[in-house]
């Protein structure tokens, strides 16, 4: 099941994406904003991809690899996943450096939040970012997320937020439909 936005194709992560994820997760500049100990050695990358694939198998949704429309190269990832041993569904995303700063992270996050609420019928979606990563905090805020201290799965040093379906539909979607 692929999803599409105005500039991106979303395809479920597959075995073939190990090489892309190795390049992404071993890049210190890209991973410095992740809330875990990165860059990753190859064994950690394989474990990371294995978990993404298992999530798809178990729940029927998960992390997508992003490609720009008209291209075939992976430019990032975006997904919704259950946080292990918690009730939370987490929005996750990351882009390679050459496509950052063009609004693609917001576009990807918006498409996935919409998919989560309308396609998966999720009641609430959570997100986390390092507070110093102002761009990521801005993406979470633009998709309607507000600070939420209940989402404490990754440690207390993060900006944690959430949005529920009705708030998203009444404020964010209504604003998009009205062009505001």
Image (cartoon, rainbow, N blue to C red):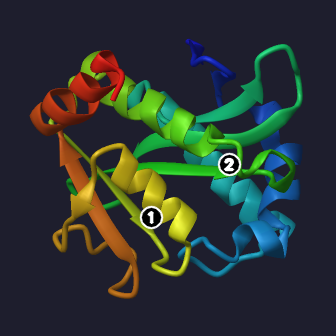
Furthest residue toward bottom = 157
- At x 36% / y 74%, what residue is drawn? 159
Relative height, residue 69 to residue 132 (above, below): above
- The reply, left or right, for residue 64 in relation to residue 157 is right
State the quadrant of the C terminus.
top left
Number of numbered tags placed on the structure image = 2
* Alpha carbon separation for disc pair 1 and 2: 25 Å
- At x 30% / y 16%, what residue is drawn? 177
Residue 69's x, y, as percent?
77, 17
Residue 102's x, y, as percent?
70, 43
Residue corresponding to mark 1: 137
Given residues 2 and 13, the one toward you in this image is 2
State the quadrant of the N terminus.
top right
- At x 45% / y 59%, what residue is drawn? 138
**Nearer the N terminus, badge 1 or badge 2?**
2
Circle on res. 122:
none
| Residue 82 visible, this orientation | no
Looking at the rendering, which quadrant does residue 43 occupy?
A: bottom right
- The reply, left or right, for residue 169 in relation to residue 26 is left
Residue 116's x, y, as percent?
33, 29
Residue corresponding to mark 2: 49
- At x 71% / y 70%, what residue is drawn? 31
Residue 106's x, y, as percent?
52, 42
Given residues 164 and 134, the one toward you in this image is 134
């Amino acid at each position: 099941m692929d999803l599409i936005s105005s500039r991106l194709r979303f395809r479920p992560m597959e075995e073939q994406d190990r090489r892309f994820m190795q390049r992404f997760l071993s890049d210190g500049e890209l991973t410095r904003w992740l809330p875990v100990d990165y860059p990753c050695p190859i064994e950690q990358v394989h474990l990371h991809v294995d978990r993404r694939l298992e999530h798809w198998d178990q729940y029927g949704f998960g992390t997508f690899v992003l490609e720009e429309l008209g291209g075939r190269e992976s430019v990032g990832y975006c997904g919704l996943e259950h946080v292990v041993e918690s009730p939370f569904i987490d929005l996750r995303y990351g882009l390679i450096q050459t496509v950052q700063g063009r609004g693609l992270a917001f576009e990807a996050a918006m498409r996935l939040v919409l998919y989560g609420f309308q396609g998966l019928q999720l009641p609430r979606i959570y997100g986390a970012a390092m507070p110093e990563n102002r761009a990521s905090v801005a993406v979470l805020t633009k998709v309607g997320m507000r600070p939420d201290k209940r989402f404490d799965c990754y440690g207390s040093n993060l900006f944690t937020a959430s949005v529920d379906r009705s708030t998203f539909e009444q404020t964010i979607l209504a604003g998009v439909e009205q062009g505001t």
